[in-house]
Image (tube, grey):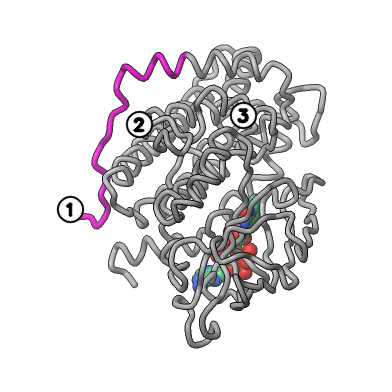
Amino acid sequence: MTTPFNFQPLELPAELLTLRREVRAFLADASSEWTGRDVGHSWTGFNREFSLEVGRRGWIGMTWPKRYGGHERSGLERYVVVEEMLAVGAPVGAHWFGDRQSGPLLLRMGTEAQRERFLPLIAQGKAAFCIGLSEPDSGSDLASLRSRATRVDGGWRLNGRKVWTTNAHLCDVMIGLFRTGGPAETEKHKGLSQFLIDMRASGIDVRPIRDLTGEAHFNEVTFDDVFVPDDMLVGREGEGWAQASAELAFERSQPDRYMSCFPLLPPAMDKLQELRLDDRLAERRLGESIAEMVVMREMSLSILGQLEAGRSPGQEAALVKDLGNTYEQRMPELVRELIDAPARINPDDRLSDLLGFLTQTVPTFSLRGGTREILRGIIAKGLGLR
Ligand SMILES: Cc1cc2nc3c(=O)[nH]c(=O)nc-3n(C[C@H](O)[C@H](O)[C@H](O)COP(=O)(O)OP(=O)(O)OC[C@H]3O[C@@H](n4cnc5c(N)ncnc54)[C@H](O)[C@@H]3O)c2cc1C
């Protein structure tokens, strides 16, 4: 059968084991105080001190040129670090978005001055980035966004409103997508541009949005005549849609799309052993779950290979995200059934704390980074069904 999807296998060479051991040893030490809830935050957890330490160890901006503070290591080495961080639910949020998305965007599209200024700061864990795409009424239909950047002397004035901006209240810089051309009705994909925005600029107001867990990690951000100098336009004016879409292939294919619940597996397995040593059904269901994850890992690695080869496998990335989110969303329920956990959180019990937090947050996993329906639309297009 022919398929429009390209999933050439890519193997992680055995030499990477040394790096894996190094990262694992560091994390074993660093994670000793983390609570179940901390670990449940995984890559959205924000901890400046931790990011500074990861930066000192050379594990941010790993693949970037040394002249921008990077380390010129391979994408596969970076993959190993990412996997290890996710496996223990490390609080990487203060550097994650810069490392995964904004840094690579600046490398590809930024000016030399932008690269020299921002990339070393990201690599050291000193500059935290957030992503300003979604708006009220423009989430899935992102190209309909209305926030506007208007040309003024020496730069641009931003007006409008972004919503669901993860960690906007803690970040230093936003990469924001704004309309610079005609109205959304006539220039939907054309007139959009990306800007580097200093989150401390006057006219920016950040308001928290509380979620089901009682926390407020995402925000509504309003822009009231915020000035952005000319040299903070990223790439070409009006090309923002293509630039932001290219970023999404990175965002949608990485291990964070199927490993957000991974830290639940080891304590759940311990608990199962403690409860029923010879439960074959439980073993089988866990085995199936792990096998599924291994397949997604192969798919994700294959996409990494394509990205490294300069391709933009958007449809394959959509497939990994959709399968990965479905997988992640099932995991807490599977564990709850297998260990027959009570329907209440015991904060003194690490597994209960983690399981409770993830049960409350997994519904959002298929929204962030693009909803299930939108991804399936992209996949259907790849299959020639739409
Ligand atoms: C935890 C979390 C963190 C986030 N962080 C960020 C962030 O840092 N920066 C950022 O910019 N955004 C962020 N988002 C926003 C996220 O990307 C959007 O929520 C998402 O794109 C959906 O947009 P919406 O919420 O406006 O829903 P809507 O677009 O209103 O969609 C509502 C429902 O309708 C469906 N739907 C909409 N249009 C179609 C269609 N054409 N065909 C079929 N179904 C359709 C959707 O799939 C969805 O189920 C975050 C979201 C979450 C949950």
Residue under numbered circle 2: 74
C-beta proximity under 8 Å, tags 1 and 2: no
The CA distance from mark 1 to mark 2 is 34 Å
Question: Which secondary structure, mark 1?
Answer: loop
State which tag comes first along the sequence, 3 or 1. Answer: 1
Residue under numbered circle 1: 1
Q: Where 131 sits versus 343, above or below?
A: below
CB at disc 2 and ligand 1 closer than 8 Å: no
- Residue 261, quarter of picture: top right
Q: Is residue 8 magenta?
A: yes
Residue under numbered circle 3: 90
Residue 332 visible in this rendered orientation of the protein: no
State which tag comes first along the sequence, 1 or 2. Answer: 1
Magenta segment's dominant SS is loop
Disc nearest the viewer among 3 and 1:
3
Residue 133 visible in this rendered orientation of the protein: yes
